[in-house]
Image (tube, grey):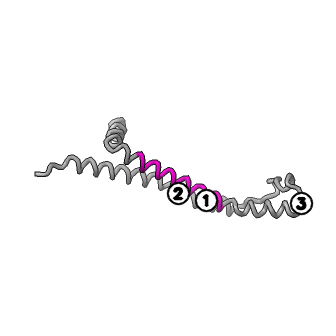
């Protein structure tokens, strides 16, 4: 295991800026996905909030979150999204390793 970690560090340091750029881009894409999914998941709560605010006329009573029934559907949708997004971390790691390994192999090829 220690040799694998050392090899990973040596591969990353040989192509540091490209690896860093790939990591930053991947993290920004994951943040964007998180923001979009959170916005989509909060739409029902925003609708319920404004509905309650219109009925009560008091913002304090509209913020009483105990009235809102989240339901099983919200949990199922959240689980499905998580199941689709979390494997991207492993896929990215494997793709980055294969790219670095390919680059290392190309650098060691001797052209006659």
Most foreground residue, 82 or 19 = 19
CA neighbours of label 1 inside 10 A, class few (<14), some (14 to 19), many (20+): some
Relative to 57, is 91 on the left or the right? left
Q: Secondary structure at mark 3?
A: helix
Q: Are marks 3 and 2 in contact (CB under 8 Å)?
A: no
Disc number for residue 37: 1
Which is more N-terminal, label 1 or label 2?
Answer: 1
CA neighbours of label 2 inside 10 A, class few (<14), some (14 to 19), many (20+): few
- Viewport quadrant of the N terminus: top left
Q: Which residue is mark 3?
A: 56
Mark nearest the camera among 3 and 2 is 3
Residue found at x 47% / y 48%: 24
The stretch in magenta equals 20-40
Relative to 88, is 17 on the left or the right? left
Q: Secondary structure at mark 2?
A: helix
Disc number for residue 98: none
Residue 22 shown in magenta = yes
Residue found at x 24% / y 49%: 105
Residue 70 in picture, x, y percent from top left: 73, 59
Q: Are marks 2 and 1 in contact (CB under 8 Å)?
A: yes
Q: Residue furthest left?
A: 112
């Amino acid at each position: 295991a220690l040799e694998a970690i050392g090899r990973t560090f040596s591969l990353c340091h040989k192509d540091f800026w490209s690896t860093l750029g790939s990591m930053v881009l991947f993290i920004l894409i994951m943040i964007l996905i998180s923001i979009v999914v959170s916005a989509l998941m909060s739409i029902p709560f925003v609708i319920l909030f404004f509905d309650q605010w219109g009925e009560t006329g008091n913002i304090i009573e509209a913020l009483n979150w105990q009235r809102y029934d989240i339901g099983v559907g919200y949990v199922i949708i959240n689980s499905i999204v998580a199941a689709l997004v979390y494997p991207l971390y492993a896929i990215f790691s494997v793709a980055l390793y294969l790219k670095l390994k390919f680059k290392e192999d190309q650098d060691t090829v001797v052209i006659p």
